[in-house]
């Protein structure tokens, strides 16, 4: 199963790749995609994992399967023009890339046609598509379903089918017989296996970071299921049939250099020798002269795009991870703080009990240090979450809600802040089942302009806190602006 690797930076990238899609959510895309990643990785291949759309949870399982960061490909958040470059950045040096789709194959951003759909991304990557079909309640009708998906958009190369939730050998025979005339080969048939399932919660699958041992077991079971039920050689041959990509790979150093403002008044240079390939704090003590940005992680704050840490490092920061559930102090020398998404509502008592860290975060905010908090971070900075005391940086209280808030957003920065200049437009995504009251401060973080008009979030001193998830690769200058503030006069 060895595949040639492309090493020339300027030559077309011949990256073997597959897109795993489905007619609808719940068909088994995650099981099949994660199982394929793990099975090929176990065979000795370097596998690059990707996920279409803004989802943070599936990439956590992909990372377990491959040992590499799970990366998102979102044509709405980052723009169609960055999909192939970001893909090539993540897949550099790999033998195979597996891209898990989102929802149904042709389901994109609401009201915007194919934008950000799996089909859209597959076309941007010129990648063959394998359709995962839930066959549990059909036999001959599967041929009509597959024919419809294969013929809907001739620019999408639907090159194979994997049948999921097959009941018996007889059921499998009927399905294969029906598909013989459909012109799309069957590349696998999977039975339902209890140990391969992954439990869900109010916002989807439970993140791998919260159940590491069980998640490792589930990924191993998915790999075994796929290995037993799929033709891996045929799938690899299909992946190799993808044509070379001519786009240039996205590079965090180049992105930071192009978008970052000049050196700050403190004299700290923009990049100061930073390399995006090193996420500092993991490899030793911070390098002298580089501002330290602490990034929350662990089970309560597991949502983060891999490119954010790379951009911060490329912009000149020393990126130091910490876990608010375990660490009682911020990393020494912290000059800025990033608190991303996650599930703090599941850990409110533990987060509240860590009074020393809550006090340290409040003191950092009071010092004027830049803080960027989104979704889970917003809740953590509030006075309380479900009546449990939090950091008290924001004059607001958060609680769980029965209502799910979900969808892409267009927004504009209302005031200058550590992430954006007033008037800057961004695209983001909301995904939460909590509410915060009030929903916006005297200076809101964003004015939402689509699909509805409202203000939300808080800009308070050097704190930017909001429900909106923004992919920084799609908002050039964000990381550089933040790092320049960290290196600024407040120090």
Image (spheres, rainbow, N blue to C red):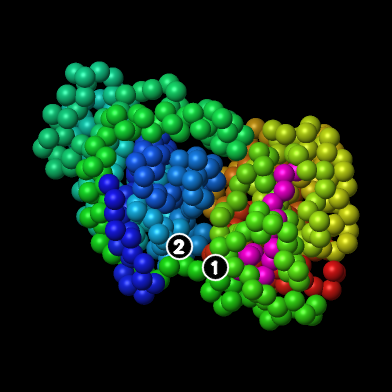
Quadrant housing the C terminus: bottom right
Determine whether the residue tagged by mark 2 lies in a helix, strand or loop: helix
Q: Contact (CB < 8 A) between labels 2 and 1?
A: yes
Residue 13, compared with residue 178, is above or below; it is below
Q: Nearer the viewer, residue 150 or 62?
A: 62
Q: Magenta includes 322?
A: yes
131, 69: nearer the viewer: 69
In the rendered image of this protein, does residue 77 appear above or below residue 181?
below
Residue 179 or 208: which is nearer the viewer?
Answer: 208
- Residue 4 percent location from the top left of the image: 29, 58
For residue 89, which numbered disc appears in the image? 2
**Is residue 349 located in the magenta-colored stretch of the structure?**
no
Q: Nearer the viewer, residue 365 or 286?
A: 286
**Image quadrant where residue 400 sits:** top right
Q: Earlier in the sequence, mark 2 or mark 1?
A: 2
Image position of 333 (left or right of 92)? right
Q: Which residues are magenta?
A: 311-324
Q: Residue at x 75, y 39 (%)?
A: 325
The residue identified by callout 1 is 252
Q: Residue drawn 87% across and 43% down?
A: 356
Q: Position of residue 323 (x, y in %)?
A: 72, 44
Residue 41 is drawn in which quadrant? top left
Determine the residue positioned at 59% across, 76% down.
Answer: 257
Task: Report helix, strand or loop for mark 1.
Answer: helix
Q: Does residue 443 show up?
A: no
């Amino acid at each position: 199963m060895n595949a040639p690797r492309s090493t020339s930076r300027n030559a077309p990238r011949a990256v073997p790749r597959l897109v795993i899609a489905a007619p609808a959510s719940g068909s088994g895309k995650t099981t099949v995609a994660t199982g394929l990643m793990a099975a090929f990785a176990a065979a000795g291949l370097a596998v690059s994992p990707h996920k279409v759309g803004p989802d943070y949870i599936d990439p956590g399982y992909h990372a377990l399967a491959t040992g590499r960061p799970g990366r998102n490909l979102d044509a709405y958040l980052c723009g169609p023009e960055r999909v192939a470059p970001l893909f090539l950045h993540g897949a550099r040096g790999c033998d195979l890339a597996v891209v898990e789709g989102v929802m149904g194959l042709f389901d994109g951003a609401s009201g915007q046609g194919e934008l950000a759909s799996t089909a859209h991304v597959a076309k941007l990557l010129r990648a063959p598509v394998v359709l995962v079909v839930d066959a549990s309640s059909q036999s001959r009708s599967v041929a009509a379903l597959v024919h419809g998906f294969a013929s809907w958009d001739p620019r999408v190369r639907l090159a194979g089918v994997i049948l999921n939730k097959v009941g018996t050998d007889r059921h499998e025979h009927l399905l294969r017989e029906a598909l013989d005339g459909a012109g799309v080969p069957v590349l696998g048939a999977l039975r339902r296996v209890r140990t391969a399932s992954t439990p869900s919660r109010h916002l989807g699958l439970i993140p791998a970071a919260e159940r590491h041992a069980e998640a490792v077991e589930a990924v191993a079971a998915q790999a075994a299921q796929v290995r037993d039920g799929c033709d891996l050689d045929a799938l690899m041959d299909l992946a190799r049939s993808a044509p070379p990509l001519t786009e240039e790979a996205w590079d965090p150093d180049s992105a930071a250099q192009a978008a970052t403002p000049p050196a700050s008044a403190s004299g700290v240079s923009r990049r100061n020798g930073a390399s995006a390939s090193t996420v500092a704090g993991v490899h030793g003590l911070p390098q002298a002269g580089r501002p330290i940005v602490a990034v929350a992680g662990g089970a309560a704050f597991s949502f983060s795009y891999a490119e954010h840490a790379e951009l911060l490092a490329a912009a000149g920061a020393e990126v130091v991870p910490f876990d608010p559930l375990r660490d009682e102090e911020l990393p020494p020398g912290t000059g800025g703080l990033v608190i991303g998404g996650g599930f703090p509502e599941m850990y409110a008592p533990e987060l509240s009990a860590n009074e020393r860290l809550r006090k340290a975060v409040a003191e950092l905010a009071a010092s004027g240090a830049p803080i960027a908090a989104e979704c889970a971070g917003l809740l953590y900075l509030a006075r309380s979450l479900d009546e449990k005391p939090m950091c008290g940086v924001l004059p607001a209280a958060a609680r769980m809600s029965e209502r799910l808030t979900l969808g892409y957003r267009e927004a504009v920065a209302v005031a200058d802040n550590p992430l954006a200049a007033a008037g800057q437009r961004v695209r983001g995504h909301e995904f939460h089942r909590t509410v915060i009251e009030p929903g916006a401060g005297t200076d809101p973080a964003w004015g939402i302009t689509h699909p509805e008009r409202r203000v939300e979030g808080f800009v308070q001193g050097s704190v930017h806190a909001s429900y909106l998830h923004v992919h920084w690769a799609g908002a050039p200058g964000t990381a550089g602006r933040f790092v320049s503030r960290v290196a600024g006069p407040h120090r």
